[in-house]
Image (cartoon, helix red, strand yellow):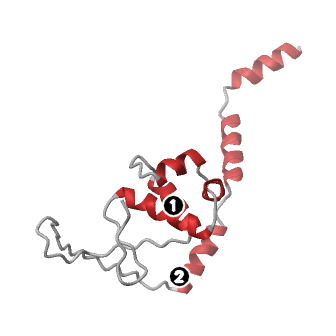
């Protein structure tokens, strides 16, 4: 199945098989082998053969890698059709507006200066170790003194 071309250089893709046919034709137009494109796109030659034959069990990321190496651009446009077999649903998406307050640079500098005066993790760990040594049972130090006698 050969994809239909419209008046411009655009090709209409209606089925997954169309991608493979377009890629094969473009590769041949560029005079490149399957091995060359497969290597450039990071896929195996066997995968590329299956893709060009219209296998629908392909990874979309690999498809786009091949299309990129072939300098093909994919665009999606809504279909305006009077054909009743094509159900066209118009969707409206609203993106919420996110407002971010302006940063008060003076407050930011003060926060950074205050943070730089905080003790480091190593300092905190050292203080924690010293406290644990001070709270260690005194019996350990007494038995050591008794052994010295």
Q: Earlier in the sequence, mark 2 or mark 1?
A: 1
| Residue at left offset 18%, top offset 75% | 81
Q: What is the quadrant of the N terminus in the image?
A: bottom left
Q: Is residue 113 left or right of residue 143?
A: left
Residue 130's place in the image compared with 81, above or below, is above
Q: What is the quadrant of the C terminus in the image?
A: top right
Residue 108's place in the image compared with 141, above or below, is below
Rendered location of residue 120, percent (x, y): 68, 57
| Residue at left offset 32%, top offset 59% | 15
Q: Nearer the viewer, residue 26 or 113?
A: 26
Q: Residues within 10 Å of mark 1 (few under 14, many from 20)?
A: many
Of tags 2 and 1, the one toward the viewer is 1
Rendered location of residue 69, percent (x, y): 59, 65
Rendered location of residue 112, percent (x, y): 61, 74
Q: Quadrant of residue 132?
A: top right
Rendered location of residue 62, percent (x, y): 51, 55
Residue beneath label 1, please?
Answer: 24
Q: Nearer the viewer, residue 32 or 106?
A: 32
| Residue at left offset 47%, top offset 52% | 51
Q: Which mark is residue 107?
A: 2
Q: Is residue 43 left or right of residue 145?
A: left
Q: Nearer the viewer, residue 79 or 145?
A: 79
Q: Which mark is residue 91?
A: none
Helix, strand or loop for disc 2: helix
Q: Quadrant of residue 60?
A: bottom left
Helix, strand or loop for disc 1: helix
| Residue at left offset 20%, top offset 72% | 91
């Amino acid at each position: 199945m050969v994809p239909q071309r419209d008046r411009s250089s655009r090709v209409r893709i209606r089925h997954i098989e169309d991608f493979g046919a377009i890629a094969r034709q473009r590769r041949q137009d560029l005079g490149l082998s399957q091995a060359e494109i497969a290597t450039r796109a990071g896929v195996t030659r066997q995968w590329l053969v299956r893709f060009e034959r219209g296998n629908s069990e392909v990874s979309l990321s690999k498809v786009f890698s091949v299309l990129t190496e072939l300098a093909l651009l994919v665009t999606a446009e809504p279909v305006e059709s009077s054909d009743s077999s094509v159900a066209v649903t118009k969707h409206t998406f609203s993106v919420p507006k996110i407002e971010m307050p302006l940063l008060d640079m003076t407050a930011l500098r003060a926060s950074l200066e205050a943070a730089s005066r905080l003790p480091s993790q190593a300092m905190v760990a050292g203080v924690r170790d010293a406290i644990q040594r001070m709270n260690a049972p005194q019996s350990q130090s007494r038995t050591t003194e008794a052994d010295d006698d």
